[in-house]
Amino acid sequence: MSISQIMAIAGKYKARKRIGRGRGSGQGKTSGKGHKGQNSRSGAPTLVMREGGQMPLFRRIPKRGFNNYNFAIRYMVVNVEQLECFNDGAVVGIEQLIDAGIINNANQKVKILGDGELTKSLKVEAHRFSKNAEQKIVACGGAVKVL
């Protein structure tokens, strides 16, 4: 048996560190954890992003990059049942909806949804219509115009 064979077997496994076994072991007293503090306590592993009261890095750096939120088209929603307040055969546009108090902003787009019932024949002008709303308006003898 040669020395290289003996060393290959002897150096194969590293002995585990036995901490807290007296000063002579080199890992006694504080067991290699230093004095006091969060990391000397039991159950110590801390959160990676935690900075202990300092403003975290991800909040210090500015937000950059593209975001679709700024470009989303938002509609003011009007249900078919709200159109019931208009006279039979009336033309209902953005100005008429503002006068009736149904919407409050002339610059925003309007979408008509099909919630509720409609009994009057109206000519409705809006930016968008749901299929259900369009069917209900046309079924009453009315007309739909997309702006």
Image (cartoon, helix red, strand yellow):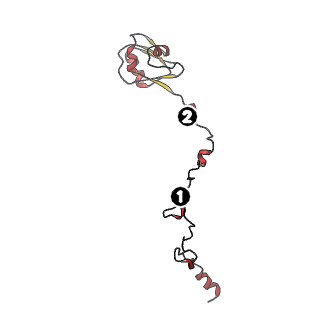
User: What's under tag 2, amino acid-wise?
Assistant: Tyr
- Which residue occupies the extreme bottom position in the image? 1
Query: In the rendering, which numbered label is found on residue 46?
Result: 1
145 vs 107, nearest the viewer: 107
* Count of labels in the image: 2
User: What's under tag 1, amino acid-wise?
Assistant: Thr
Say few, some or many: other residues with alpha carbon within 10 Å of mark 1 (under 14 / 14 to 19 / 20 or more): few
What's the residue at 58%, 76% (across, down)? 26
Question: Where does residue 57 sit, x and y in percent of width and height?
Answer: 61, 48
Question: Where does residue 80 sit, x and y in percent of width and height?
Answer: 40, 20
Query: Quadrant of the rendered structure where residue 116 is?
Result: top left
The answer to whether residue 108 shows anywhere in this view is yes
Secondary structure of residue under mark 1: loop
What's the residue at 54%, 31% (across, down)? 72
What's the residue at 57%, 79% (across, down)? 24
What's the residue at 48%, 62% (across, down)? 43
Secondary structure of residue under mark 2: helix
Mark 2 or mark 1: name the one nearer the start of the chain: 1
CA gap between label 2 and label 1 equals 35 Å
The answer to whether residue 13 shows anywhere in this view is no
Image height of 10 relative to 89, above or below: below
Image height of 17 relative to 114, above or below: below
115 vs 37, nearest the viewer: 37
Question: Where does residue 21 sit, x and y in percent of width and height?
Answer: 52, 77
Question: In the image, which is nearer the foreground, mark 2 or mark 1?
Answer: 1
- Which residue occupies the extreme front position in the image? 36
Q: Which residue is mark 2?
A: 69
Query: Quadrant of the rendered structure where residue 132 is?
Result: top left
